[in-house]
Image (spheres, grey):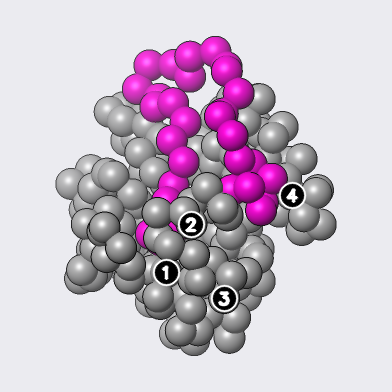
Amino acid sequence: MLGWLASLPPSERDAAVEDRLGIGGPAPPDSPPGDHIVGYHASGVAPVVRMLLEVPVAADDVLVDLGSGLGKVALLSHVLTGATARGIELQPALVERARQAASRNGVDVTFTCGDVREAPLDDGTVFFLYLPFTGPVLADVLGRLRTVASRRTIVVCSLGVEVDREAPWLARRTIDSFWLTIYDSVVPGVPPRRARERSRLLGREAEAIAFERPGD
């Protein structure tokens, strides 16, 4: 997939990968998510691939997308790295489309319909969020992630929102990216994350996609 995707102009990549995964077209209408819960916005393919490279996400990781929408991040993460990936999404219509896409592509990626404040998070090693919630909902979710981080070091990746002010136990990595921020949990007594090599599935094509320049 990466070779094909890198061959496309950057302006065409998002629509192309969504069509290939079977999640193209407008998101289905659904009821308002609720107070401090943001509606569906699709993540760009470039920052998702950048995340997979920078973390790096490997086959022994469990990536959990918090507010997974149509499933683009979880599906791409599994297909490109072999990592276990799953999504949690509040809106049933989005979950159904994501499940259909996983089935159509023959991949073992699961999507749970539920509230992130209540859904199981304990297996996650890498967590992704693209501004799915704000205010007290975000604070509650970060509190749940802090509980996971008290047992093992986790990586939190966010688009469009900076979370370290709400969570001083997260240490921001220094990366040159306008949209993407990556944090490592730092909790006393918890060993640091074991070093991982980039997935062998990610090569020069992934870097070409991840480091695209606006306007290319």
Mark earlier in primary sequence (1, 3): 3
Label 3 element class? helix
Give amino acid for label 1.
Ile
Q: Residue at x 65, y 65 (%)?
A: 79
Question: Dominant secondary structure of the magenta stretch?
Answer: loop
Residue 36 within the magenta-colored segment of the rendering: yes
Name the spot of residue 109 as percent of width and height, x first.
71, 53
Spatial CA distance of label 1 from label 3 is 10 Å
Q: Return the residue at label 1.
A: 209
Mark whose residue sits in front, 1 or 2:
2
Mark whose residue sits in front, 4 or 2:
2
Near-viewer residue (109 or 185)? 109
Label 2 element class? helix
Give amino acid for label 2.
Arg
Mark whose residue sits in front, 4 or 1:
1
The 10 Å Cα crowd at callout 3, few under 14, some 14 to 19, many 20 or more, is few
- Circles 1 and 3, Cβ within 8 Å, touching? The answer is no
Q: Return the residue at label 4.
A: 102
**Mark identifier at residue 3:** 3
Give amino acid for label 3.
Gly
Give the residue at the far top of this rendering.
31
Label 4 element class? helix
- In the image, residue 45 sits, relative to residue 39, either above or below, namely below
Mark earlier in primary sequence (3, 4): 3
- Circles 1 and 2, Cβ within 8 Å, touching? The answer is yes
Q: Return the residue at label 2.
A: 13
Spatial CA distance of label 3 from label 2 is 12 Å
- Circles 4 and 2, Cβ within 8 Å, touching? The answer is no
Mark earlier in primary sequence (4, 1): 4
Quadrant where the N terminus sits is bottom right
Q: Which residues are magenta?
A: 18-47
Name the spot of residue 18 as percent of width and height, x first.
59, 48
